[in-house]
Image (cartoon, coloured by chain):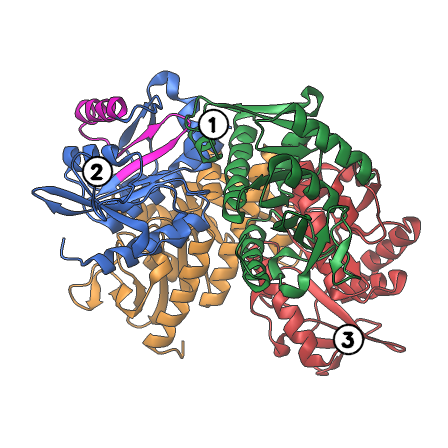
Chain colours: A blue, B green, C red, D orange
Amino acid sequence: MGQGPSDIATALAEVGRRFDARNWVLGTSGNFSVVIDREPLRLTMTRSGIAKGLLTAESLVEVKADGDAVRPADGKPSAEALLHVEVTRARRAGAVLHTHSIWSTVLSDRHAPAGGLAIGGYEMLKGLEGIATHEHREWIPILENDQDMLRLAASVRHVLAANPACHAFLLRRHGLYTWGESLPQAVRHVEILEFLFEAVGRTEG
Amino acid sequence: MGQGPSDIATALAEVGRRFDARNWVLGTSGNFSVVIDREPLRLTMTRSGIAKGLLTAESLVEVKADGDAVRPADGKPSAEALLHVEVTRARRAGAVLHTHSIWSTVLSDRHAPAGGLAIGGYEMLKGLEGIATHEHREWIPILENDQDMLRLAASVRHVLAANPACHAFLLRRHGLYTWGESLPQAVRHVEILEFLFEAVGRTEG
Amino acid sequence: MGQGPSDIATALAEVGRRFDARNWVLGTSGNFSVVIDREPLRLTMTRSGIAKGLLTAESLVEVKADGDAVRPADGKPSAEALLHVEVTRARRAGAVLHTHSIWSTVLSDRHAPAGGLAIGGYEMLKGLEGIATHEHREWIPILENDQDMLRLAASVRHVLAANPACHAFLLRRHGLYTWGESLPQAVRHVEILEFLFEAVGRTEG
Amino acid sequence: MGQGPSDIATALAEVGRRFDARNWVLGTSGNFSVVIDREPLRLTMTRSGIAKGLLTAESLVEVKADGDAVRPADGKPSAEALLHVEVTRARRAGAVLHTHSIWSTVLSDRHAPAGGLAIGGYEMLKGLEGIATHEHREWIPILENDQDMLRLAASVRHVLAANPACHAFLLRRHGLYTWGESLPQAVRHVEILEFLFEAVGRTEG
């Protein structure tokens, strides 16, 4: 990835402040990861229970493919580390971002019976990597929330395989997962999707 | 508590700026307290009539268990000092935060006839201390507002005793009271609850 | 008033930034005044066509009782200078603030047929000077908007005389006028009223 | 125009931060241009794919009347450069601003069947250049979105000719185009129109 640990910490802190100002990571919600090695897989990710508006290098932990901490060895990664690993593998993502916004929460519940949310016809869709026209129809799968992380990780794996073109998924009454080749691309995807959720949510009334 | 007065003032000022930026303490609304001694009980709390976005050490007053000022002796604590005392005793809280947001105000009125508001099924509930699953159902009692502070303090005492698991209560058309073992935990509770109020408020439509 | 010109400019600039951040003075909307003398009446007020988030000493103009500029003599006060003069006289206000928010605009239209908006039962009402209980009922008159400033000033005079207890009035599809003995009190009134407008607006649905 | 390149970059960066803070240019959406020469026509405009909250001199590219880059020669202007050129010519604008807000998106869809949106009776309309009364009725044409920029530019030309008094147009489910003689005037138009969209959107319910 070509970035040292302190570059990553600085970049994630900036993302945290930006999302915090928009109320997408209230409390200590949300978690962020960046891939730092592929073979074997290593992610730098936010620790459990940290306010995202105040990230420092000490807020991060290095994690391996089973979701356990490598450095510091007693670091406690987010409980959802395995979901980040699944996304990283299925999409060869360089960064995975998970946020909790009002509109993603509201829509994830409203559209859960349909198994997902289709968004089409918006210019903003062009902000999703590889999309060149507003005539695109993005299907955003919605998974039932689950505290059993092994089971939820398996669901994520299944959903990503079944929806090879999707840029994101929602966990019901929980929040958004999206990703990118790089951290800036993943940030862009969060912003695009949050915009679309609010536009759709207000249009539905 | 291990914090000196100036640490507490600095921490409360930061909380004030954060909540002010989110419009949870407009005007001079809201009040904050931190326990500085248990035997006898001493709280540092915000004075009456102070804008919370501009707190300094001079904005604070030390209060004893009857709600009167200790230092400065002529300091005027918030009129709701007694409610902070009740919460501190009933929950052994280290910090109590009271905010006035739009959504807590709207929901406190809408759900007053039911005596409270149940919130269940949201991942964000895990941000409340001791809650490990979104399957939790949080009952948030709603009390009628009252300018007679002795009577309102008695109501708070009764409600806290009758709802030993609750993390917060609402005063009707008034606002939120929540607390924590520490100030950061109390701040987290405010953020979690404000998020949930808005999510529920928008879902109800 | 005991404040020099540069103190007033500094204080108004801070108010401008605060209101601008909340979108209450978008474009170059809104205007602010502070009384600097009573006999004869002199107000320092914002010039016409100035963005309120960027106020400096050069953004202000001294005005006399007929709404014309005193210093600089070629200064162009806000077109609504006469309304500030009316309020200053009728209420012996030390500061008058006029803002354009979404919710004041929406409610000023929705309730115009009734000639005003009654707000009662909210704790936030206690932020209005002289109000000691949420059981207060505040009547906020709504005037039809008018580009004829002499005629509108006469309407304001009439409405203030007919409603001696009111803390504010709305101009239909235009915005809020409120005031205070001092600038901080007027600021508090803006914040309290904007909060109440949004709470009422969302409660009405 | 009287402004050097670094003045323009500084001014556009400030506009970008301001609009970004209000969520009007999320992701890398929106684009801004300033006329730097009339004969032949030269615009400084934002490059494609740049976050508007972080603009620097390197984020800009000089463009000629066919929408191609002049300096740097390999610079990639926004795909919508031709629309800026059309506006600049039809209105002799000094600056053109394109933003993507929630309310412009929602209203552009809701009113598309009528071909446009009429806004009348609001004091804020006086913030539009040349409008002296709230009794003005502003017609904001809505064009169907189109990825074929030559065709869309022709539509824009047609709409501007057919609506010589309009201050702005909307692209359906896409966003707002407005302009001004100067950059500050164009900024004011964005703010006025965004205010009006939200006020109308909430009034319609």
Q: Are marks 2 and 1 on the same chain?
A: yes
Q: Residue at label 1?
A: A204
| Circles 3 and 1 on the same subunit | no
Image height of B72 relative to A152, above or below: below
Q: Nearer the viewer, mark 2 or mark 1?
A: 2
The kind of secondary structure element at disc 2 is loop
Distance (Cα) linking label 3 and label 1: 50 Å
Report the side of D67 relative to B199 (left or right): left
Q: Is residue D39 above or below residue A39?
A: below
Instruction: Identify the residue at image location x=62%, y=69%.
Output: C13
Q: Pointer 1 indicates a residue of which chain?
A: A
Which mark is on residue C63?
A: 3
Q: Which region of the structure is painted magenta?
A: A150-178
**Is A159 in the magenta?**
yes
Q: Is residue D88 left or right of residue B47?
A: left
Q: Name which of mark 2 and mark 1 comes first in the sequence.
A: 2
Number of the label disc, if any, that sits on residue A68 = 2
As drawn, the residue found furthest toward the left would be A39
Extreme-top residue of the structure: A113
- Out of A26 and C151, give the one closest to the viewer: A26
Q: Is residue A194 magenta?
A: no
Q: Give the Cα separation between the discs numbered 2 and 3.
A: 70 Å
**What amino acid is labelled 2 in the image?**
Asp
Residue plotted at (63% across, 59% down): C29
Q: Residue A189: x, y in percent?
A: 29, 42
